[in-house]
Amino acid sequence: MQIVFHEKYYTSNYSMDPAAAPGRLDGIMAIIKTHKEDYDIIVPKPASEKDILRAHTDRHLKAIKGDSLLFEMASLAAGGAILAAEKAYNGAPTFAVIRPPGHHASADSCWGFCFFNNISISLLKLHSENKIKSAFVLDFDLHTGDGNINILTNRSDDFRVKILNPRDESSSSNYINEVETYMQNLKDIDIFVASAGFDQGINDWGRLLHADDYTKLGSLMKEYSEKLCKGRRYALFEGGYYHPDLGPHIHAFCQGLK
């Protein structure tokens, strides 16, 4: 499967937050490079301002541009999301190891280590090209992706997006069952995308999911995208802060997704 990555994502001084921490991506890319038979690394370009403005206001864009390094990183993350979406639309399951994350970025504001909404920018790019009219977003980050919801739901155009932030945290099996039950009731979906946060990991903030659970989430993405939209599926890296588990958990997820 395809892995979107740029060496500049290793940059850690664009912000002072856990998502920008030094070393956060090292273990991820080490395990991906170890499994060369499974992954093909592809390099993105920054998103254009036109791409960003489909999801954000001009005021918000200018605010981020006020910090040149932050703008460089955020637009490169958004560009990575677009590349992942394009590859997925053309039939290649794709995971984007990008940062900064994006699911807490709304049209005119942002918080939670996010600056541009990578999910929205990538989906709205496909929609602008008349490739998709609907999408399903599985946001399995520990924290609800309010930016995804704010930008992608209750829209005035013809783009329809279903979003699930699983909330049954009573057990890992119940969490997985919630996801599968929701997917069983989906219809008329053109592409699947995950806001893939790994802070629900058993050693991370959520203390809930193991590697096998992430494999199952990836497998569900594969199974139901194949039923509904010719297997078009991709995922974008969001949260996850226990560095030793990030590589194994992302690899586990990708083994299900591929």
Image (tube, rainbow, N blue to C red):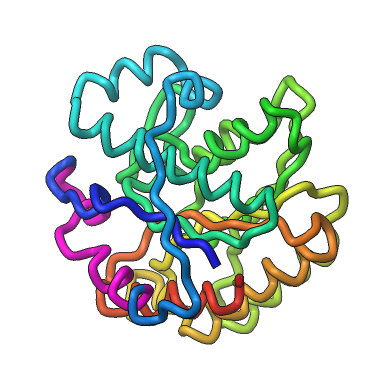
Residue at 76% of width from left, 40% of height from top? 134
Q: Left or right? Give the position of 134 relative to 95.
A: right
Q: Is residue 230 depicted above or below 52 in this figure?
A: below
Q: Which residues are magenta?
A: 15-32
Q: Position of residue 167 (x, y in %)?
A: 58, 64
Residue 232: name its quadrant. Answer: bottom right
The quarter of the picture where the C terminus appears is bottom right
Q: How many marks?
A: 0
The quarter of the picture where the N terminus appears is bottom right
Q: Is residue 157 depicted above or below 140 in this figure?
A: above
Residue at 75% of width from left, 71% of height from top? 223
Residue 245: name its quadrant. Answer: bottom left
Q: Position of residue 242 (x, y in %)?
A: 27, 72
Q: Left or right? Give the position of 173 relative to 84.
A: right
Q: Is residue 22 magenta?
A: yes
Question: Looking at the image, which is closer to me, 38 or 205?
Answer: 38
Q: Position of residue 116 (x, y in %)?
A: 40, 34
Q: Is residue 172 depicted above or below 61 in this figure?
A: below
Q: Is residue 7 depicted above or below 1 in this figure?
A: above
Residue at 37% of width from left, 52% of height from top? 98
Question: Looking at the image, which is closer to me, 258 or 159?
Answer: 258
Q: Is residue 115 magenta?
A: no
Q: Is residue 237 visible in this depiction of the protein?
A: no
Residue at 41% of width from left, 44% of height from top? 44
Q: Position of residue 162 (x, y in %)?
A: 72, 47
Q: Is residue 218 visible in this depiction of the protein?
A: yes
